[in-house]
Amino acid sequence: MPTTTLFKLFYWIALIIEMAVRVPLNQARRKAATTERRISTLEFVLLSLLSLTGFFLPLVYTFTPWLRFADYTLPPALGWLGVPLLACAVYLFIRAHRDLAANWSPSLEIFSTHRLVTHGIYRHIRHPMYASQWLLVFAQLLLLQNWLAGPTGLLLFIPFYFLRVRAEEQMMLDTFGEQYNAYRRSTGAVFPRL
Ligand code: SAH
């Protein structure tokens, strides 16, 4: 099997695992009462574009020859570096979803049953899912060596991350007040505080 095919396979295995992890949480979320919902138009646009760059462009790149004009080739060692990055991304993704459980939402929401999670992976970092997404977008540009299917994920995730974290932390502060403030002081965003 050519290495490029193997890299595509790894990427899709990771994506399928992540989608499967979210199935039960999405079902639980539909039953919960939302007491607060904050999503700006810009964030919504960026989120929609992220599914284009993370899913639809990789899909076209994997299953059709249409994007071949935009291919690039990296040294093999760099391509292979994408595999451990991807594995770490999936690991963090699974742990974060297990710890956040019913408090998880794809947008910014507070549920009537919402609890501030400070255990598990959240004891060390406040944004393990976004940390996982950082790893994923770097893995994407190493594994999917195509200007449209590869680095576009990172390009969009940069503005999304900063916008989202600012809005999310404000919402958590408004909801949990001093409890969140203390939690924020004792943790890092995506890197553990030393
Ligand atoms: N930023 C976190 C969570 C992303 S999911 C991460 O990267 O892992 C976004 C939702 O998680 C938001 O709707 C917010 O209400 C919820 N959330 C974020 N941090 C939380 C925490 N520590 N405890 C409970 N809910 C949290």
Image (spheres, rainbow, N blue to C red):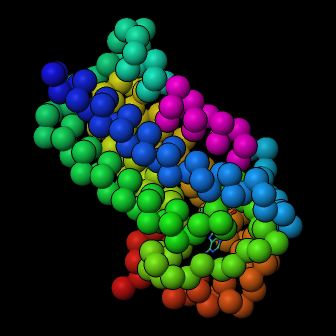
Question: As drawn, is 176 to the left or to the right of 11?
Answer: right
Give residue 61's position: percent from left, percent from top.
Answer: 40, 19
Q: Which residue is drawn at 78% across and 50% down?
A: 40
Quarter of the image for residue 70 reads top left
Q: Is residue 50 magenta?
A: yes
Q: Residue at x 56, y 82 (%)?
A: 118
Q: Quadrant of ligand 1?
A: bottom right
Question: As drawn, is 155 to the left or to the right of 70?
Answer: right
**SS assignment for the magenta stretch, majority:** helix
Q: As rendered, which of 129 and 181 lies closer to the eye?
A: 129
Camera sees residue 74: yes
Q: Residue at x 72, y 43 (%)?
A: 44
Q: In which quarter of the image is the N terminus?
A: top left
The part of the chain drawn in magenta is 43-56
Q: Is residue 182 above or below residue 6?
A: below
Q: In this view, does 104 lie above or below 57?
A: below
Q: Quadrant of the C terminus?
A: bottom left
Q: Residue at x 60, y 53 (%)?
A: 24
Quarter of the image for residue 3 reads top left
Q: Does the magenta stretch include residue 54?
A: yes
Q: As rendered, which of 151 and 135 lies closer to the eye?
A: 135
Question: As drawn, is 140 to the left or to the right of 45?
Answer: left
